[in-house]
Amino acid sequence: EPIPLQTTAMDQISTVMNADENVIEGLKSICEKSQPEIIGLPTTSLSEAQGSDIKRLVREFRAKYPQHASIAVVPVNTPDYGGCLESGFALALEAIVEVLVPETRHAGRRRKQVNVLASSMLTSGDIEAIKDWIEGFGLRPVVLPDIGDSLDGHLVDSEYTPLTLGGTPRSEIETMGESVATLVIGRSLSTR
């Protein structure tokens, strides 16, 4: 299935010569053209080796372009030379929770809401089954990430969309701190 991705256009030379401005302008461009709710900003081994501080770059982006304050940017350090797909996925999931789920004193307020942190090993069919099982107990699952709708084999009418379809809405992610329980599925998430 098509998965829309966008890049900051950092090549070897620009990265070594400091491509911080590429990241900031890339974020600006994505915000202006696509207006997503959330932007994931993972690093690569090249930017990691150069020493890019993506959290600082996000702060600089916020200061330079305050008009895009409503768009969440999730920076995550995912160098290719350390770990694997599962560990990078776990880091990304941790970063999403860190950035989007506010601290609260109301844990358990949503008595029927259950968080499900889904590891990279789960397919869209697995996610759908897990949601059905939880709903079978009269509970409401909030799955992160929920690939059940976006990678289940259906195509949309438009030929191209710059944004991923389906998934867990940002508004749902922001309520996860008030859930009654959190299930973590997949051993690769156990160290996070």
Image (tube, grey):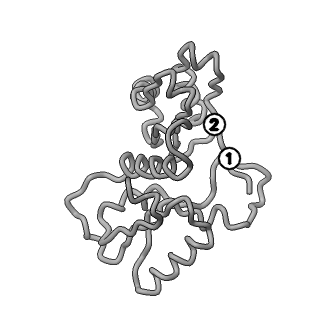
**Tag 2's secondary structure?**
helix
User: Mark 2 or mark 1, which is nearer the start of the sequence?
Assistant: 1
Residue at x 65% of width, y 38% of height: 6
Q: Is residue 73 above or below residue 110?
A: above
Q: Residue 113 sits in which quadrant?
A: bottom left
Quadrant holding the N terminus: bottom right
Q: Residue 183 sits in which quadrant?
A: bottom left
Residue at x 45% of width, y 30% of height: 54
Q: Position of residue 3 (x, y in %)?
A: 68, 51
* Mark 1 and mark 2 residues within 8 Å of each other at the beta carbon: no
Q: Residues within 10 Å of mark 1 (few under 14, many from 20)?
A: few
In the image: residue 171, left or right of residue 34: left
Residue at x 63% of width, y 57% of height: 165
Q: Which residue is mark 2?
A: 33
Badge 2 amino acid = Lys
Q: Which mark is residue 169?
A: none
Nearer the observer, disc 1 or disc 2? 1
Q: Which residue is mark 1?
A: 4
Q: Position of residue 66 (x, y in %)?
A: 42, 30
Badge 1 amino acid = Pro
Residue at x 36% of width, y 48% of height: 98
Q: Residues within 10 Å of mark 2 (few under 14, many from 20)?
A: few
Q: Position of residue 139 (x, y in %)?
A: 40, 80
